[in-house]
Image (tube, rainbow, N blue to C red):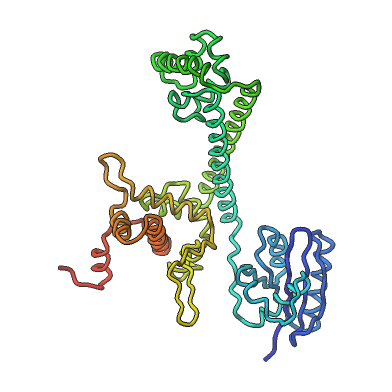
Amino acid sequence: MSYCPVAGIDVSKRFSDMCILSPDNKIFAQEKIYHDETSINRANALLQKAERLFFSKPVIVMESTSHYHLILFQFFSEHGYDVIVVNPLQSNSMKDFSIRKRKTDRVDAFKLAMMYRTKTLRPSQIPQTATRALRQLCRHRAELLNDVSSYKNRLTALLDQTFPGYDKVFSDVGGVTSCAVLVRFPTPTILLVEEESELVEVIAAASKSGYSFAKKKAGLLISAAQKAQTLGIHSCADETLIVCTIQMLRTLSESVLQIETAIDNLLAQIKEMRNNVSLLQSIPGIGSHSAALLLGEIGDISLFKKPKQLAAYFGLDPTERQSGSFRGTKNKLSKRGSSYARAALHMGVVNSICKRGKDSAANPVLLSYYEKKCKNKPAKVAQAASMHKLVFIVFAVLRDQKPFELKTPEQHAVEQGFVKAA
């Protein structure tokens, strides 16, 4: 059997190591690739030399290493090479086929090339430009929102010390009206020195709720400030810390709005992507931002043949431990997939099964499934099972390109022909 030459590339941040194997698995060339034009062109010249000598274009194998592999992937793909990007979890589990214990970049590049010969490598998904942009925007938005929560917690901690009782007046201390008040009156001492009319004006302008609301809030704040004079812990740094924290909150909130505008503009330009987001939004519990995030993480749904593959891609597949007669019973989720997607699915389940007041749950079928699991499983295990079920719904909606329809398992079984209608 004739083989084509294969090049393994071990990718790192500043440089990468390339090892080219001949068809008979002998080392043809080894090269260190610095991530600049000269070095990459030199590596390309070696690949072209191998192509001329062995009458076949080399196949390139590299690991998916954060974003560092993307430059090499794009360059070699545009030059006509078949580039295979593999998951490090897969390659790491297969690299140790040598008796000697050696771990260097050169050795890893050689092993990556040799692994191609086993024919067991499964290429990782390299998303298209638009999908990658959506993924990056949604992930950045999620990280910014985490930062917003972090700074709100810092502000709450500061106010608990300097202004006890403030959170009873404004439950959302990082809200627009609260921030406007704190920037103008950051400490109880400053608030009590200023005229009450100024406080009312600030609250009325920020809240846009009228002077009666503003006067009521102002009265509560003055009362809380008077008590804080006695109970609070005061420091000369209080004013600076509170104002700086609010400035960071405002900057982060503005950045979130910019990201959301960019996501909307991207979806407006690409009809297929916009339609898929609308389909995902038809699922109870999944809002516009969660739908966009899930689509960005999934990419092309046709890459997944079964819903269980998508669940495993998200890290919602259970681990398994068995050796001889031993079989582990405390198996956890692998959590090897996207943490952003799992967070969106978790929120989707919470929104689907929670009852708000007298209203019924958004998805009574999923709620029934969750309650059934809770009878013999802990709540978190039941939640994970519900997330797994939600993945199956996401898969079906994107695969069939049809909006979600709320059906009981019995109705679904009848429609599929598994059972006859009563």
Q: Is residue 148 left or right of residue 363?
A: right
Relative depth, front residue between 162 and 176: 162
Residue 190 is situated, as x and y percent measured from the top left of the image, at 57, 14
Q: Is residue 2 left or right of residue 283?
A: right
Q: Is residue 350 depicted above or below 24 in this figure?
A: above
Work out which quarter of the rendered image holds the C terminus and state it.
bottom left
Residue 346 is situated, as x and y percent measured from the top left of the image, at 43, 52
Q: Residue at x 27, y 65 (%)?
A: 412
Q: Is residue 35 depicted above or below 419 in this figure?
A: above
Picture quadrant where residue 380 is located? bottom left
Relative depth, front residue between 332 and 122: 332
Q: Is residue 327 depicted above or below 224 in this figure?
A: below
Relative depth, front residue between 141 and 95: 95
Q: Residue at x 47, y 64 (%)?
A: 332
Q: Determine if residue 168 is in view.
A: yes
Q: Determine if residue 405 is in view.
A: no
